[in-house]
Image (cartoon, rainbow, N blue to C red):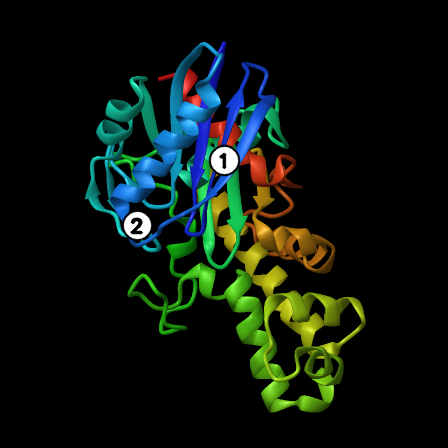
Amino acid sequence: MLTIGVDIGGTKVAAGVVDDSGEIVEHTLRPTAADRPDVVAETVADVVRELSQGRDIEAVGVGAAGFVDETRSMVRFAPNLAWREEPLQKKISGMVGLPVVIENDANAMAWGETRFGAGRGQSHVVCVTLGTGIGGGLVFDGALFRGRWGMGAELGHMQVLPGGRQCGCGNVGCWEQYASGQALVKDAREIAEAEPERARTLLGLAGGKIEGEEVTEAARLGDEASLAAFRSLGDWLGQGMADLAAILDPGCFIVGGGVSRAADLFMDRAREAFGERITGRGHRPLAEIKLAELGASAGVVGAADLARRR
């Protein structure tokens, strides 16, 4: 049984034909016209038609970076794409003549990791995706948790510091302002500006423009400012997971996203902080904290499997 999974991001559309064991049979990639909703839908339809040739495709799952409604058919709002009340399911289904399911991209990633990746065999999973911001997905009792309106698991926007940093969502003190790629860079820049002697390696690598790649490289070379920024990220990541455990009590946390490629620089501290700050420590089991296994394919695999279960 074959389905197609599509992962729509701010810069690219990734798609693949996926079998019922979670294996990608064929894969393709296209650029995203983020400011043109109709072109995005046409791009998705094009890759579905391309991947369908010579195959019996049952359905299509689409992971979209935005608020997807409770019927899994409309994208109500997307911060990085020009979607506002976009009837994406109807558009794409009409173009390709196949059943289509729309899902939030982080939910699709969480489902893929739970079914076929680091969460295999787990029934209660919290997936945290560390990129520019923080995304999330929840699987409980073996089912994807979406919330009443389909907009649950926006983990990056729980407030961890009242009166804290301004967030792009309009609030202040959100978790993603302290435990994400943008937070890492902001912390490193602030330390380098205040104490340049601690950031000599970083400043030498950056040449005046500090970004995440330079912070990671400098940290691996022993740069004090960069290592401090990673320690802060790990500390806040552990704190946030402890708060989530107090509410959700999962058996497993899965940490993925682009920042997780530097996990050796912050995950030990995240696990320590989690153990130090969890409610009832010493009198409860601690959830496993694992790295995602499927990488960039998780969203495609998860979306395809959700289409199979529509």
Q: Is residue 240 above or below residue 13?
A: below
2 relative to 79 in the view: left or right: right
Locate residue 174: give its quadrant: bottom left
Indicate which disc residue 78 carries.
2
Say which of 245 and 132 sits in front.
132
Looking at the picture, how far across and down is residue 92, in whole percent? 29, 29
Residue pictured at 70% horizontal, 78% vertical:
202
Q: Are marks 1 and 2 in contact (CB under 8 Å)?
A: no
Looking at the picture, how far across and down is residue 89, in whole percent? 26, 29
According to the picture, the residue beneath numbered tag 1 turns out to be: 299
SS category of the residue bearing label 2: loop
Say which of 296 and 98 sits in front.
98
Q: CA distance from mark 1 to mark 2?
A: 17 Å
Task: Judge whether residue 159 can be spotted in this image.
Answer: yes
Q: Residues within 10 Å of mark 2 (few under 14, many from 20)?
A: some
Residue pictured at 47% horizontal, 53% vertical:
134
SS category of the residue bearing label 1: helix
Looking at the picture, how far across and down is residue 284, in whole percent? 60, 39
Q: Is residue 174 above or below residue 63?
A: below
